[in-house]
Amino acid sequence: MTRSRIDWQDLLFGLFLVAVAAATLVATRNLTVGSTADMGPGYMPRVVSLALLAFGLFFCGRGIRRAGMAIEPVQLRPLLAILGGVAIFALTAERLGLAIASVITVLLASFATREGRLYETVPFALLLSAAAVLLFVKVLALPVPVWPR
Amino acid sequence: MELFDNLLMGLSTALELNNLGLCLIGVLIGTAIGVLPGIGPIPTVALLLPFTFGLSPPGAMIMLAGIFYGAQYGGSTTAILVNVPGETSSVVTCIDGHEMAKQGKAGTALAIAALASFFAGTLATVVIALLSVPLSVLALKFTAVEYFSLLVLGLIAAVVLAHGSVAKSLAMVLLGLLLGLVGIDVSSGAARMTFGVAELSDGLDFVPVAMGLFGLGEIIANLERPAERRVLSQSVRSLIPSRADLRAAFPAMVRGTALGSVLGVLPGGGAALPPFSSYALEKKLAKDPSRFGKGAIEGVAGPEAANNAGAQTSFIPLLTLGIPANALMALMIGALMMQGIQPGPQIMTEQPKLVWGVIASMWVGNLMLLVINLPLIGLWVSMLKIPYRLLFPAIVLFCCIGTYGIANSLFNVWLMLGCAGIGYFFIKVGVEPAPLLLGLVLGPQLEENFRRAMLLSEGDFSVFLTRPISAVLLGIVALLLLALLSPTILRNRKAALAEAS
């Protein structure tokens, strides 16, 4: 654990909150706020996002002023492989069917670690795909195509 | 004997053949994910939620509850044999449990852990039954005003008593509340923050949010750490503890159960905090504290009893008041809503079969767990041989299919993807995601009750203080927040949480 001069964890979380609050205020600017006795749909979003804004600014300020732990460097391999695996499932599940989508998803997700061996991963992906089709489509009757349409 | 009648009614529900089967499935899955490190009950319950649609409401709740307390049993097996906690709640069991295993007493440790869990589970069931009736009588007096105050108390207490920085957790609750506002406003019909996406008009589904934040985000962070080597050297010989072992363990079990039951009922309670407190208590009470860390049997019996008791009594606020004590209970609320049951103070009078069925099933489930865990220990041990490199792609796949399954919508899969990224970000900046889930689930109810209360009082905030029950509830909130500002409590809390992590 190395120390850093400013608290990046606080600062980044603060910036995230400010961004969310700002986006909400913009997105809900046209909703009627109303009065406390008769609240419009915009009342709660406004109140909550203003509170979030305050929290965000507080964390930003605290983060800049005090020292903190350095954030461990981001490793792209697991991040991209897992997110990519989910994305490929979303892209292929309805078009190519569950059987094929499952195999691709498992294979892509497996790239998240260097430990994987193809002779192990490929049969495992096929096995999982078969299990998924059997469990979700046959037993639990999930309405998703099994094969490409 | 109303209590007795209620328990009998619950038992008859729990003993129906298909509910028995669901209970068995629940505790089996629970034990499995408990044994496996790296997958916890929260993503598992989230994953299984979509498939509880077709079940009866009691059946669904019985199964999901079984996963939670089943995981407490499984977690200790891994802790004792491999010195890796299968669940966060079994971190303490590693200390003395694994030490016992090293001394060749793995079987004794496992048996004591299972017996302590069973003992605690049985007593906690009685505690739930005893506390539920008075609480539900109180709940009948609740209007929108009281319910709003209660929701505030639940959220604040959950934040104060849970891990991590209070300020950050409060911010996370607000973030969850904000996410809960997405969708068509019920009273005006205006679309809020839907960005023209049709799928968002019904609001954010919390299943993809929970799976992304807790399941996938966690996996990505796990994979960044160097893989731990699991050594399974100890063979399990005799499972029957000696009379001396039992005599040493029994008082610790009783104390652990009492401590766990109390800590579990508190909002923010659950299975994580009780074992640490119990371990500290046992060490303080022991004649020779130096034995702890070297295979003291009390160090296994106390915490194991405490985590199981806590896991079960954390259902009390949910079953009587409709308030979730932790993120997992928030998912349970979601399960109820999917079944078309509005959680809230009226749940016990309107759904007695459900509430008492779940309570009684816990005892039945604990009995099953005792049988499943001890003779079948070999089966669970062999599950530990599945390497993480095979486990995580399977979890990713099942998360994808599960999320898709809630509404057959690919939108939810994309939503889960986004939440996975955000969950990873939260881990990187050191923020706990659990308060967000509480906020998300309670957000709509909080807004609805607030608006109703304000409508009744014509915008007068003092109504929250002039009504006695509400005033007491908000008084507790104020006390909790004030207590946080006091330096001694701040220091103690820091020390307690440091010990816990």
Image (cartoon, rainbow, N blue to C red):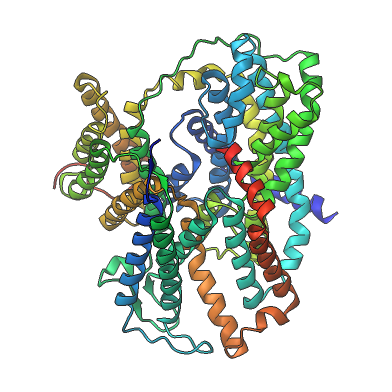
Q: Residue at x 53, y 70 (%)?
A: B445
Q: Is residue B213 above or below residue B238?
A: below
Q: Residue at x 60, y 67 (%)?
A: B152
Q: Nearer the viewer, residue A55 or B316?
A: A55
Across and down, in percent, residue A91 comes to: 18, 49
Q: Residue at x 60, y 81 (%)?
A: B453
The number of discs equals 0
- Res A85 quadrant in image: top left
Q: Is residue B296 above or below residue B117?
A: above
> Relative to B161, is A13 on the left or the right?
left
**Image quarter hosting the C terminus of chain B:** top right
- Res B201 quadrant in image: bottom left
| Residue B410 shows in the view | yes
Across and down, in percent, residue B485 comes to: 63, 60
Residue found farthest to the right: B1
Q: Nearer the viewer, residue A97 or B281?
A: B281
Residue found farthest to the left: A149
Q: Is residue A62 above or below residue B35?
A: below
**Image quarter hosting the N terminus of chain B:** bottom right
Q: Is residue B465 above or below residue B387?
A: below
Across and down, in percent, residue A133 comes to: 29, 38
Across and down, in percent, residue B427 comes to: 40, 45
> Relative to B188, is B233 on the left or the right?
right
Q: Nearer the viewer, residue B376 or B465?
A: B465
| Residue B12 shows in the view | no
Q: Residue at x 69, y 45 (%)?
A: B360
